[in-house]
């Protein structure tokens, strides 16, 4: 599960084509303090980022990467991945169309229920003054 969460964090952060400073900071904080992620070494995170970059550079569409992630996570883990992905998209206080598209893609592929979507988006809108 840990590698899949790392993949979602980076996919969300890179969904607009730019890794913003706020995104770097929050990824760093999550990998240092989030219970399921703090067990992962920085070398493992670098390796995961390298593997993910190779997939993206070889032309593998994000929807296929997300489908692979879905196959390895439980419903609860998918909801966690979704919430963290939304967080990463909003953290720089600006949501651009590619980030919104990524969020919608996660909702579809991860089969996130409407109640969870409303809660996660509502929380993000309150914290980041971002319209989702």
Image (cartoon, rainbow, N blue to C red):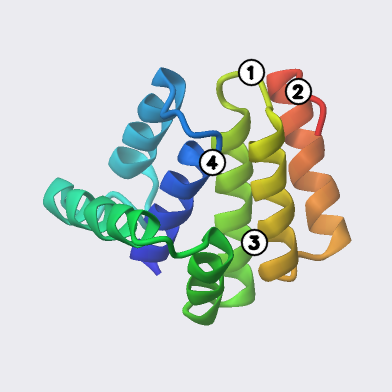
Whether the residues at callouts 3 and 1 have beta carbons within 8 Å, the answer is no
Q: Residue at x 39, y 56 (%)?
A: 56
Whether the residues at callouts 1 and 4 have beta carbons within 8 Å, the answer is no
* CA separation in Å, label 2 and label 4: 16 Å
Position of 123 relative to 119 (above/below): above
* CA separation in Å, label 2 and label 1: 6 Å
Depth order, front residue of 48/53: 53
Task: Indicate left or right for 54 with 100 as reference.
Answer: left
Whether the residues at callouts 2 and 1 have beta carbons within 8 Å, the answer is yes
Residue under label 2, please give it.
130
Residue under label 3, please give it.
79
Looking at the rendered structure, the secondary structure element under dot 1 is loop
Mark sitting earlier along the chain (2/4): 4
* CA separation in Å, label 4 and label 3: 19 Å
Looking at the rendered structure, the secondary structure element under dot 3 is helix
Residue under label 1, please give it.
93
Task: Locate the C terminus by quadrant.
Answer: top right
* CA separation in Å, label 3 and label 1: 22 Å
Position of 111 relative to 71 (above/below): above
Q: Which mark is residue 15?
A: 4
- Which of pointers 3 and 1 indicates the residue nearer the eye? 1
- Which of pointers 2 and 4 indicates the residue nearer the eye? 4
Q: Residue at x 71, y 34 (%)?
A: 97
* CA separation in Å, label 1 and label 4: 15 Å
Task: Indicate left or right for 81 with 18 as reference.
Answer: right
């Amino acid at each position: 599960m840990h590698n899949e969460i790392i993949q979602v964090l980076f996919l969300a952060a890179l969904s607009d084509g730019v890794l913003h400073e706020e995104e770097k900071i929050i990824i760093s904080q999550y990998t240092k303090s989030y219970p399921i992620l703090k067990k992962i070494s920085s070398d493992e995170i670098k390796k995961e980022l390298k593997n993910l970059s190779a997939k993206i550079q070889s032309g593998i569409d994000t929807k296929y990467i997300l489908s692979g992630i879905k196959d390895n996570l439980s419903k609860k883990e998918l909801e966690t991945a979704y919430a963290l992905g939304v967080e990463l998209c909003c953290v720089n206080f600006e949501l651009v169309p590619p980030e919104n598209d990524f969020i919608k893609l996660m909702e579809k592929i991860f089969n996130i229920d409407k109640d969870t979507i409303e809660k996660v988006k509502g929380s993000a809108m309150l914290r980041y003054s971002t319209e989702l």
